[in-house]
Image (cartoon, rainbow, N blue to C red):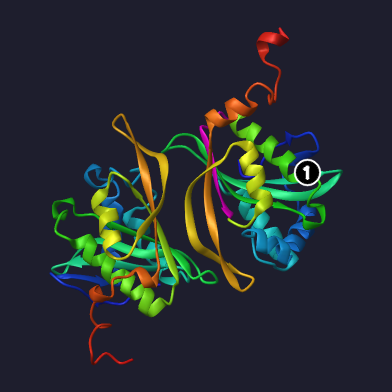
């Protein structure tokens, strides 16, 4: 399914994806600037099958997908995937397709909003993820929302003559920083 | 690629699955002992659904499924995803299930050794990985004997039997195979000696 609209700070929000977003996602995954740690830079995704992909994600009963918007423009996607409802566990992921916007805190804010929704609305109990160890910005953004490292998968990525390890993390509701709970959950008037 | 070919162990043989194996598959996936030990290949279903699943498995380009035969009957199954575009040639074992009625007879170890011989001695993979529930002592013992090492531990990952259990993520490098089995476990006699 698609996640609902969640407004964050600094012009960042999560919102349900539309067809045009799926065409953007496919194009971004073929660009060298944003695929250093997102491989393999070839894909079966085309503009022609964007609608089919959208429908598949929309109808999925074990994932929640959002587009990430910055100043009302779609700049990436995030979600929680492969949810095992019995274990109440899922894998989170994020992709910022606009490399010219790196360093503006978009990922950190999107992750904060996503994790709040996961704990407050989906009632999951644990999430986990894999991130290239060299992609410090990404795992730091996850740490700020309560993720901690549980291991390192050695030599996961080979890029330009170097091997890169992978950072494995997990998060629980209790590890989310309560003082960073976004609106509407922190609002006094939010219905309980 | 989707159905595994024949790999011979000493007491077991990995072979392509057939429709005749499906009643046994169905029985195992509905067995609480199997479900406690690890994840099931598919949930219990009607016979027609099992046939559809087998047909679908045949279309999977990266996933490989074997039946494990021992003492003239099917005693288990194993499935693995084999890849290698990124990170080097590798396999990830998804399911390794032995019929609970056949536990503690050595089938698990024998089939696991044969499978890893296929991975390292035949496919020349660089690494094999899997996830094991942290209280599955039998699986962990086999993994340790093969040369696996833990690289991550997820806490309270799986819920069953009224509580949560951790998950141990483990991997076996090519070097571990070479060191422990490289000279003794060969599928074929080296050509140099056969000439």
Location of residue A132 in the rendering, given as x and y in whole percent from the top left corner? 33, 46
Residue found at x 53% / y 28%: B175
Location of residue A122 with respect to B107 vertically, above or below: below
* Quadrant of image for the N terminus of chain B: top right
Circle 1: is it few (<14), some (14-19), or many (20+) Cα within 10 Å? few
Q: Name the one closer to the observer, B45 or B13.
A: B13
In the picture, measured across the screen, residue B65 lies left or right of residue A71, that is right
Location of residue A129 with respect to A35 vertically, above or below: below
Residue found at x 55% / y 47%: B130
Location of residue B68 in the rendering, given as x and y in whole percent from the top left corner? 75, 45
* Quadrant of image for the C terminus of chain B: top right
Q: Name the one closer to the observer, A60 or B52.
A: A60
Query: Furthest residue to the right?
Result: B72
Location of residue B22 in the rendering, given as x and y in whole percent from the top left corner? 76, 57
Magenta stretch, main secondary structure, is strand
Q: Name the one closer to the observer, A12 or B104.
A: B104
Query: Furthest residue to the top?
Result: B195
In the picture, measured across the screen, residue A69 lies left or right of residue B16, that is left
**Residue B121 can be seen in this image:** no
Location of residue A4 with respect to A109 vertically, above or below: below
**Residue B153 can be seen in this image:** yes
For disc 1, the marked residue is: B106
Task: State which quadrant residue B164 falls in.
Answer: bottom right
Residue found at x 29% / y 65%: A145
In the picture, measured across the screen, residue A64 lies left or right of residue B79, that is left
- Region rendered in magenta: B123-133
Q: Is residue B134 magenta?
A: no
Q: Secondary structure at mark 1?
A: loop
Task: State which quadrant residue A55 falls in.
Answer: bottom left
Location of residue B63 in the rendering, given as x and y in whole percent from the top left corner? 57, 47
Chain for numbered disc 1: B
């Amino acid at each position: 399914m698609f996640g609902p609209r969640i407004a964050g700070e600094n012009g960042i929000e999560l919102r349900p994806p539309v067809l045009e977003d799926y065409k953007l996602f496919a194009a971004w995954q073929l660009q060298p600037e944003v695929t250093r740690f997102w491989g393999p830079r070839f894909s079966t995704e085309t503009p022609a099958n964007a609608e089919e992909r959208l429908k598949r994600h929309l109808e999925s009963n074990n994932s929640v997908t959002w587009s990430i918007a910055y100043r009302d423009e779609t700049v990436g996607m995030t979600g929680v995937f492969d949810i095992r409802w019995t274990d109440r566990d899922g894998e989170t992921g994020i992709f910022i397709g606009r490399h010219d916007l790196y360093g503006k805190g978009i990922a950190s804010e999107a992750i904060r909003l996503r994790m709040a929704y996961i704990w407050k609305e989906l009632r999951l109990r644990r999430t986990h993820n894999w991130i290239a160890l060299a992609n410090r910005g990404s795992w730091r953004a996850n740490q700020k929302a309560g993720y901690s490292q549980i291991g390192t998968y050695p030599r996961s990525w080979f890029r330009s003559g170097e091997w890169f390890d992978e950072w494995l993390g997990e998060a629980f509701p209790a590890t989310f920083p309560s003082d960073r709970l976004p609106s509407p959950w922190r609002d006094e008037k939010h219905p309980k | 690629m989707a159905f595994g070919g024949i790999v011979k162990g000493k007491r077991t043989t990995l072979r392509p699955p057939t429709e005749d194996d499906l009643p046994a598959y169905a029985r195992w996936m509905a067995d609480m002992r199997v479900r406690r030990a690890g994840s099931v290949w598919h949930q219990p279903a009607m016979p027609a659904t099992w046939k559809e699943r087998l047909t679908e498995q045949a279309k999977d380009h990266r996933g490989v499924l074997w039946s494990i035969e021992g003492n003239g009957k099917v005693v288990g199954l194993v499935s693995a995803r084999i890849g290698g575009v990124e990170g080097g040639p590798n396999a990830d074992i998804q399911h390794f299930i032995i019929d609970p009625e056949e536990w503690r007879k050595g089938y698990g170890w024998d089939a696991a050794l044969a499978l890893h011989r296929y991975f390292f001695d035949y496919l020349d993979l660089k690494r094999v990985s899997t996830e094991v529930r942290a209280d599955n002592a039998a699986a962990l013992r086999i993994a340790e004997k093969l040369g696996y090492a833990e690289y991550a531990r997820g806490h309270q990952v799986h819920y069953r039997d009224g509580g949560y259990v951790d998950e141990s993520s483990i991997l076996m490098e090519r070097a571990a195979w070479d060191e422990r089995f490289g000279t003794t476990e060969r599928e074929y006699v080296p050509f140099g000696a056969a000439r």
